Image (cartoon, rainbow, N blue to C red):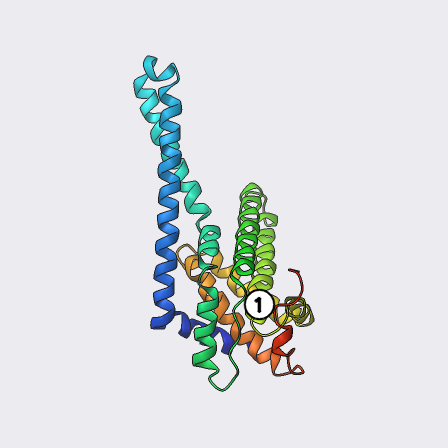
Amino acid sequence: MLIQSAFAAFRQTLSPPLRAILWKSLGLTLGLLVLVWFGLTRLIQWFQASHHISEQYPLLDTLAYFLAGFGLFVALAYVMPAVSILVAGFFLDDAAEIVERTDFPGDSPGRALPFGTAMLYAARFAGLTLLVNIGALIIFFVPVVGIAAFFAANAYLLSREYFEMAAARFRPLPEAAAMRRDHAATTLAAGCLLAGMMVVPVLNLVTPLFGIALMVHVHKRLARRLPAPAEPGRLRQGPLP
């Protein structure tokens, strides 16, 4: 089931509708990072200009500014996956709808989460991803443990967030979380695939769209084994898990 879902999600990620969403998401991500980098470098430049070392050692000051700017560039590149997840949160419901409409035309369409709830999910997800990556950077040089902890944390996090996003289009949020726990082995295996993508530069930028497409397929296949979901009037009930 997972292999079929992965191939279907990969095909969808390369399709024109999802490619259009991908370019918009990447454009906004890069634009946001450039603005942050520009603002931080201007702040560093202002700080150095107000320090005495700028007058006494101009060459050293120039070198420090260059190194600070380059360091910021590396740091922002490292957190880019988290930023891309946050930005992609604006488009994940659109992507899920495309996958549902094209790959499951005979099924009733899902319903998007309310905008505020969707953004809360995206912000929480991006924040957790950033914390996981910072933690992984801290313990990266611990043999075996660092890489294993990074992979395990990302696999769990990605499986939880993307599956629940896909499932919440058809059932209340607490029920979506319970469904994920009931099928933990399947959803975690999908999360391992996404965690593998997260460690590959450039490929990690398409992970949000691939992840939601993958989990739409996983949810659809698992839902066929369950009783009918809650009636429409009960959709979106309950607090965030």
Q: Is residue 127 above or below residue 90?
A: above
Quadrant of the drawing holding the N terminus: bottom right
Three-letter code for the amino acid on which mark 1 is drawn: Phe
Which residue sits furthest front? 233
Which residue does the image show at 49% across and 73% down from the upper left?
A: 6
Which residue does the image show at 56% across and 68% down from the upper left?
A: 190
How would you rate the neighbour count of disc 1 (Cα within 10 Å): few for under 14, some for 14-19, many for 20 or more? many
**Can residue 161 be seen by looking at this rendering?**
yes
Depth order, front residue of 58/230: 230
Percent x, y for residue 98?
43, 74
Percent x, y for residue 215?
53, 70
Percent x, y for residue 27?
34, 55
In the rendered image, which quarter is residue 76 located in? Answer: top left
Which residue does the image show at 66% across and 61% down from the upper left?
A: 239
Residue occupied by mark 1: 163
Image check: 57 left or right of 211?
left
